[in-house]
Image (cartoon, grey):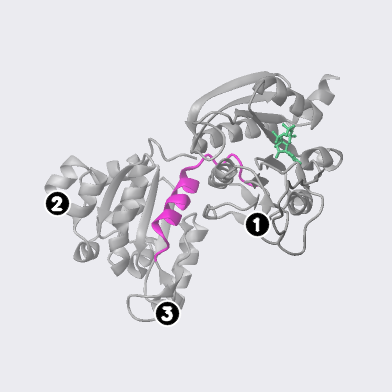
Amino acid sequence: MSLVGKTIVLGVSGGIAAYKAAELVRLLSKAGATVRVVMTRGACEFITPLTLQTLSGNPVSTDLFDLTQESEIGHIELADSADAVVIAPATANLVGKLAHGLADDLLSTVLLATRAPVVLAPAMNVHMYENAAVQDNLKLVAKRGARIVEPAVGSLACGYEGPGRLPEPAVIVEEVARAVGADDLAGASLVVTAGPNREPLDPVRFVSNRSSGRMGYALARAAWRRGADVTLICGPTALEDPHGVRVLRVDTAGEMHKAVRREVKAASVLLMAAAVADYRPKKVAEQKLKKGTGKLSIELERTVDILADLKKVRGRRVVVGFAAETENVERNAARKLAEKGLDLIVANDVSRDDAGFEVDTNEVTLIDGNGSEAVALASKDEIADRVLDRVVEIRARGGRRKRAAKRA
Ligand code: CTP
């Protein structure tokens, strides 16, 4: 779910990783959130409030008993305004206070007063992190509903190696987005495919297409944010693995077919955003093909149509296809919807510069058995959420086939 228009209260407690809060503020603001920072006295020793105030564009609160801050802001108002409270870094002391209900400064008071989801990103020395008291406190606050972002493993500022590093700010942003997300896909397990395939000609050459994988990655990320368990099966892409998502990389359409057949068994939704290769070279040369003087023809043979093949084993699963078209977009897509037996097809015109392949935006038409809905040009993240809204609707009414059966 998007962070646009959400208010995130970012609590910064006093550890060396406090400097990374600056990047976190920047990323949350860039994602469209209003960021209100609360710093402990210790945090102010590591990074100045002015830095976080400048980056967030909002006053930074530091003191429970500061008359000016209290009269203008008020810890209850701060707690109530939050769509989520995230503490990064969360020190052992802060986690301990939360676990035992202590409220002796502004941040710990806000934490007790808020009804919003709480995300904690602990960061500390490895021995402190592994201390039984800290582990017990973390378990206790997790049991009460706080989301704990596991610390990263690596070399720590104190010179030790191990778990205790603050995770990358981008990871914390994803966890915050999942915390404020609709949760309407909680318990659902989704398989998403993305990207192109590579069909080898010889050890150094292949046949492929222009798909970047961005639409499928956006779907995987958005579904995870909405509470789903997500497996992303992708062809070769240059994109970073989305946080929280299980990523399986494949090359050829044959490999993708095998992976989809295996993974879909445990899934309730399949989103086929991959630009699957329809043809592959009939012969793959064992050695690099040498150039001659004349023309060279490559004979291609059909690959399996993964969606068509799944028709017989799909059961109650919600299946969404994507149609990449350059002409007669809606007509072609509607034909694919029927032929492949889909619940929904997302049609896009890949001949445009601002939609389809290799760009961050898309303009699509969502087509199902009841008609079509145009979705105006938007980021692929926004389009992903629109597609998932439809998936949620289809799931709520028990799938296309169940509805059709009732009508009959
Ligand atoms: N698809 C598939 N297996 C294939 C080809 C496509 O499962 N071998 C899926 C795609 O992932 C997509 C949908 O089918 O969800 C439509 O893909 P598209 O490339 O638009 O259409 P094709 O069926 O390949 O037809 P054409 O190339 O003739 O337009």
* Of callouts 2 and 3, the N-terminal one: 2
On-image quarter of the C terminus? top right
Which element is circle 3 on?
strand
- The reply to whether the magenta stretch includes residue 175 is yes
Which element is circle 1 on?
strand
Q: What residue sits right under mark 2 in the picture?
A: 66
Residue type (three-letter) at the residue carrying disc 1 = Arg
Left or right, residue 250 beside residue 7:
right
Position in image of residue 206 (x %, y %): 68, 52
What residue is at 80 percent from the left and 45 percent from the top?
299
Q: Nearer the viewer, residue 235 or 401?
A: 235
| Inter-mark Cα distance, 2 to 3 | 39 Å
Vertically, is 388 above or below 403? Answer: below
Q: Residues within 10 Å of mark 3 (few under 14, many from 20)?
A: some
* Of callouts 2 and 1, the N-terminal one: 2
- Number of the label disc, if any, that sits on residue 312: none
Q: Nearer the viewer, residue 143 or 299?
A: 299
- Number of the label disc, if any, that sits on residue 161: 3
Position in image of residue 198 (x %, y %): 68, 51
What residue is at 42 percent from the left and 79 percent from the top?
161
Vertically, is 203 above or below 65? Answer: below
